Image: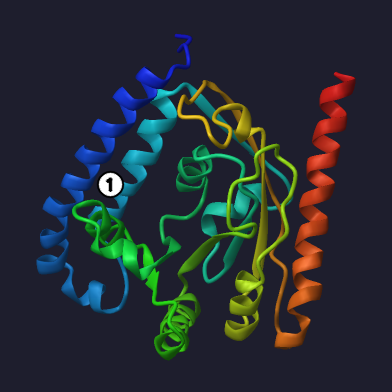
Amino acid sequence: MKIRPSIAYSLIVTVPSILFFSSLAVILYPLDWIFLRKRQLQGKWGATVTVVKLGWGYWMLWAHGIKVKVSGPAAQDLKKMKGVIFVLNHQSVTDIMTVIKILPKASSFISKKELRSVPVFGWAMKVVGTLFVDRSRRTQNQALSEVNDLMRDGFNIIIFAEGTRSPDGKLLPFKRGAFVMAIEAQVPVVPVTILDSRLCCPKGQLAIAPGTIHVIADNPISTKGLKIEDRHQLSDQVRHIMLKHLEKFEENRETS
């Protein structure tokens, strides 16, 4: 069934689904806390993540008629990866749903601490594994240290390197935080390039259109032995990989 993109349809699908899955998170989390308390203390997650986070991501993609195709050297191993930082470009709000579908369950976004206090939504973010970082200088180092410990235990971090959505699909300047974090924790960086998600929902638009989002997963880049001063070189390496994929994809589109 072809779904006609419209603001009304997207709002009808999105708003109730956020309320439903956020409420479901609030209901399920106490059960996780009671029966899986030991796992919670270890920073591990139970049914809440599976049902709420994956359920919301898959539902939103299906409801809007969006398919996701993954290719690249690491396509087959993507869901098996542990203790890595996935670095992605950012074109659309649909990128969030996309990474929920293609990346391992034990993968977390990092968000600013202030969002944790938003009623219902903030709690839902917490119980599905979002890691909140206090950006004040007094506590930031401690928060990042805790994130590093989680990665060493096998958890993954998801970071959009540009920090915001690109309006035209072209790469914006990269923030260095992901690369500093990877070097400090000595964990691999995995470049994941998202292609054409902006055609489903470009920045500044509310309506989500059906379509196919292509994703290219590259092999992990080791940070063993790297020092903080190597962050620029690591950032440039990842950026070069993504640029190459984006340029080749556009060339193939023009010739097809």
Q: Nearer the viewer, residue 55 or 124?
A: 124
- Which of 182 and 33 lies nearest the eye of the viewer? 182
Instruction: Tell whether 9 sits left or right of 5.
Output: left
Mark 1 surroundings within 10 Å by alpha-carbon count, few (fewer than 14), some (14 through 19), many (20 or more) = many
Kindly identify which residue carries mark 1: 52
User: Vertically, is 1 above or below 7?
Assistant: above
Q: How many labels, in total?
A: 1
Q: Tag 1's secondary structure?
A: helix
Q: Position of residue 136 (x, y in %)?
A: 43, 82
Among the 4 quarters of the image, the one containing residue 31: bottom left
Q: Residue at x 71, y 74 (%)?
A: 222
Residue 213 falls in which quadrant of the image? top right
Q: Position of residue 105 (x, y in %)?
A: 41, 55
Residue closer to the observer: 40 or 254: 254
Say if 131 sits above or below 22 in the image: below
Residue displayed at 21% across by 39% down = 19
